[in-house]
Image (cartoon, helix red, strand yellow):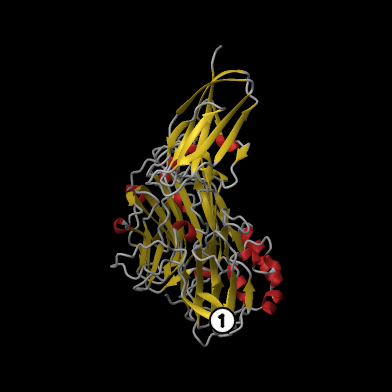
């Protein structure tokens, strides 16, 4: 928890919406105290850093307690008994059939009921197509995925949120974060209600629009090349533009990482970060678009962070790349009274190579994402940029944020992608007003990935220090190269004690790994492109993306997979529209720990039997089937004939069928 302040008049949904759209809101350290925190579904067996369960990862089943309400069994997800406001709710599940209930101010009857675990069903017309509800890239309505919900939900005396799950859905994971502010008990807060939601509906719509459009820069313009000295006196930077010209594509990415952006305010250097990373883009300096930052991916970076100063300030780009380029700086400043609670803008960078990530609990470690100490501050955002040397997802690790010496994390998360407002291990580029993923090269997550999060109402103030640890948990053991950039407001003496000096850091960006989705076996017909002409009644079929499995390569990165089968079940695949003539036929299967034994035959020829059991998921390699004379059509039959004693199932899958036309 942390101490910060707020104005003394009545706090309402309206005033919170004003704060969300006020770029100057995080600049001042207020007077009236409040505390900030988060409750999540993290694994409740994680109770101490000294315990063997500290890295427990069943994060989809945690909650506060069970209770009965009017005959209903409800899981209490969140409960506060003080004035406050919910600033961010992040949720996701594989089945949203459930009921969420909000109880305000100690009421025993719910004040707001949502018939789902899906905030598109919150029930407020003003939130339709509103940026206050961010839909995750994995979202399929009624099936899978989630949202991040940014509508402030204030309450006068307390709030309780419960979940009622439908009968028969035990065992389905449901992940959540609920972030909040707690105010002193004498604080006047207007509780969220149907009436308040209607009263401020126009303002809710307007706030969503304001967060989605670029800020219009105001103030006096100053220009320079690689060094820019700003006007003297009580002022604040409202807009900063950095343009880098003269770079071709062969040197662009490495050069942007070796251009060091530095800023000095009133004699104190508070920013020293690679330009690519300060922009929010990280490795590769790709495009960025959020409320506080913009980058076009070609050398133009814009910052909308408010940066106040008392007397003087300067910006500088130091070129450590050895590559010549043209640099121009432009800033706008306005008059701003620098008072005793005004904070300086800071940004720092921390890089580590060869970090071990693993799924073995007793081998898991944590990485020092940042450690800020020395004075007051307000944490305002960060990005994580990395090169993943392993072939599968790296981001199972939770964030653990300690504030002002807390013994346990005040913010205990459920996964790296969850912290960055997405879900289900996505490797998809996306941009929102609140951050996004500027880089996501391969669906397997191998190679380059960057996540960005900027905080608006969900700021984390601290009175003396804030430590951010990130668990290094992955799907399979491997290594990653991580770098974090953090953005905060603070006193001059606040500092990130684990910051790296980019001028001393030698790192050439590795070549991107090959894209498994572009891997194609020659002369092949992709099985996932075929519709079975016959399939036994008990079988189910799916087209499965295989790009995330590290121990093999699949043509087109997909397979046609069958499950739910019993011995004797059969599938027929017809290859039609072929040129008449002789063909040599073969195929590629998938092997895994829950796969069965199949027999594959060509037309009515003798079948070839293959045991598809293997401890990990691999491609079988080429299996020759024989030769046939075709009049334009070939039929491939697959029959489930058995199961290895070591196998846990009877699934089977086919990657592709290879047809090599032979000369007559």
Q: Nearer the viewer, residue 581 or 494?
A: 581
Camera sees residue 557: no
The answer to whether 261 is drawn above or below residue 489 in the figure is above
Count of numbered circles on the image: 1
Q: Nearer the viewer, residue 562 or 515?
A: 562
The answer to whether 356 is drawn above or below residue 640 in the figure is below
Q: Position of residue 626 (x, y in %)?
A: 49, 23
Q: Position of residue 298 (x, y in %)?
A: 53, 42
Quarter where residue 140 is shown: bottom right
Residue at screen point 43% across, 66% down: 42
- Residue where numbered disc 1 is placed: 69
Q: Nearer the viewer, residue 381 or 132?
A: 132
Extreme residue in the top direction: 664
**In the image: residue 19, left or right of residue 467:** right
Residue at screen point 71% across, 76% down: 199
**In the image: residue 501, left or right of residue 341:** left
Split into 4 quadrants, where in the image is the N terminus? Answer: bottom left
Extreme residue in the front direction: 568
SS category of the residue bearing label 1: strand
Extreme residue in the left direction: 50
Camera sees residue 332: yes
Split into 4 quadrants, where in the image is the C terminus? Answer: top right
Q: Residues within 10 Å of mark 1 (few under 14, many from 20)?
A: few
Quarter where residue 389 is shown: top left
The answer to whether 419 is drawn above or below residue 76 in the figure is above
Q: Position of residue 321 (x, y in %)?
A: 39, 41
Q: Position of residue 134 (x, y in %)?
A: 59, 60
């Amino acid at each position: 928890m942390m101490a910060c302040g707020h104005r003394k008049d009545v706090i309402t949904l309206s005033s919170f919406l004003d704060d969300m759209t006020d770029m100057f809101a995080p600049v001042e350290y207020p007077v009236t105290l409040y505390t900030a925190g988060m409750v999540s579904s993290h694994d409740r067996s994680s109770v101490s850093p000294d315990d063997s369960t500290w890295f427990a990862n069943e994060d989809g089943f945690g909650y506060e307690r069970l209770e009965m309400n009017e005959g209903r069994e409800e899981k209490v997800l969140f409960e506060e008994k003080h004035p406050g406001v919910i600033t961010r709710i992040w949720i996701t599940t594989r089945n949203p059939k459930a009921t969420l209930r909000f109880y305000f101010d100690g009421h025993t009857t719910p004040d707001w009921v949502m018939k789902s675990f899906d905030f598109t069903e919150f029930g407020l017309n003003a939130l339709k197509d509103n940026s206050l509800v961010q839909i995750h890239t994995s979202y399929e309505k009624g099936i899978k995925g989630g949202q991040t919900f940014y509508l402030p939900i204030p309450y006068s005396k307390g709030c309780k949120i419960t979940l009622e799950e439908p009968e028969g859905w035990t065992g389905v994971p449901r992940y959540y974060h609920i972030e909040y502010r707690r105010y002193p008990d004498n604080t006047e807060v207007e509780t969220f209600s149907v009436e308040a939601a209607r009263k401020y509906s126009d303002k809710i719509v307007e706030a969503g629009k304001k967060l989605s459009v670029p800020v219009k820069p105001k103030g006096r313009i100053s220009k320079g090349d690689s060094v820019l000295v700003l006007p003297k006196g009580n002022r604040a930077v409202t807009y900063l533009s950095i343009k880098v010209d003269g770079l071709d594509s062969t040197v662009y990415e490495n050069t942007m990482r070796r251009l060091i952006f530095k800023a000095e305010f009133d004699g104190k250097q508070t920013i020293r970060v690679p330009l690519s990373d300060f922009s929010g883009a990280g490795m590769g300096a790709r495009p960025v678009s959020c409320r506080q930052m913009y980058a076009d991916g070609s050398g133009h970076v814009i910052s909308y962070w408010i940066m106040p100063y008392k007397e003087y300030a300067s910006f500088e780009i130091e070129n450590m790349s050895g590559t010549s380029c043209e640099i121009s700086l432009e800033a706008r400043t306005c008059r701003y009274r620098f008072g005793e609670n005004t904070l300086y803008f800071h940004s720092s960078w921390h890089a580590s190579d060869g970090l071990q990530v693993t799924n073995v609990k007793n081998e898991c470690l944590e990485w020092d994402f940042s450690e800020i100490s020395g004075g007051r501050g307000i944490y305002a955002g960060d990005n994580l940029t990395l090169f993943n040397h392993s072939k599968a997802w790296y981001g199972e690790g939770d964030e653990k944020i300690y504030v002002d010496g807390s013994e346990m994390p005040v913010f205990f998360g459920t996964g790296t992608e969850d912290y960055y407002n997405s879900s289900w291990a996505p490797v998809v580029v996306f941009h929102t007003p609140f951050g996004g993923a500027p880089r996501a090269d391969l669906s397997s997550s191998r190679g380059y990935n960057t996540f960005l999060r900027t905080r608006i109402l969900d700021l984390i103030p601290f009175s003396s220090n804030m430590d951010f640890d990130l668990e290094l948990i992955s799907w399979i053991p491997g290594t990653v190269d991580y770098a974090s950039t953090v953005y905060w407001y603070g006193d001059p003496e606040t500092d990130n004690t684990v910051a790296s000096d980019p001028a001393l850091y030698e790192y050439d960006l590795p070549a991107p790994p090959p894209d498994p989705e572009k891997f194609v076996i020659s002369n092949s017909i992709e099985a996932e492109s075929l519709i079975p002409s016959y399939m036994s009644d008990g079988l189910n079929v799916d087209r499965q993306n295989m790009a995330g499995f590290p121990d093999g390569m699949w043509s087109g990165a997909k397979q046609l997979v069958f499950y739910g089968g019993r011995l004797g079940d059969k599938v027929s695949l017809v290859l039609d529209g072929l040129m008449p003539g002789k063909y040599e036929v073969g195929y590629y299967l998938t092997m895994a720990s829950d796969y069965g034994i199949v027999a594959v035959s060509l037309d009515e020829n003798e079948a070839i039997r293959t045991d598809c059991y293997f401890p990990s998921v691999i491609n079988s390699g080429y299996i020759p089937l024989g030769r046939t004379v075709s009049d334009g059509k070939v039929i491939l039959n697959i029959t489930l004939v058995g199961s290895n004693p070591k196998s846990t199932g009877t699934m089977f899958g086919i990657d592709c069928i290879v047809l090599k036309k032979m000369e007559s």
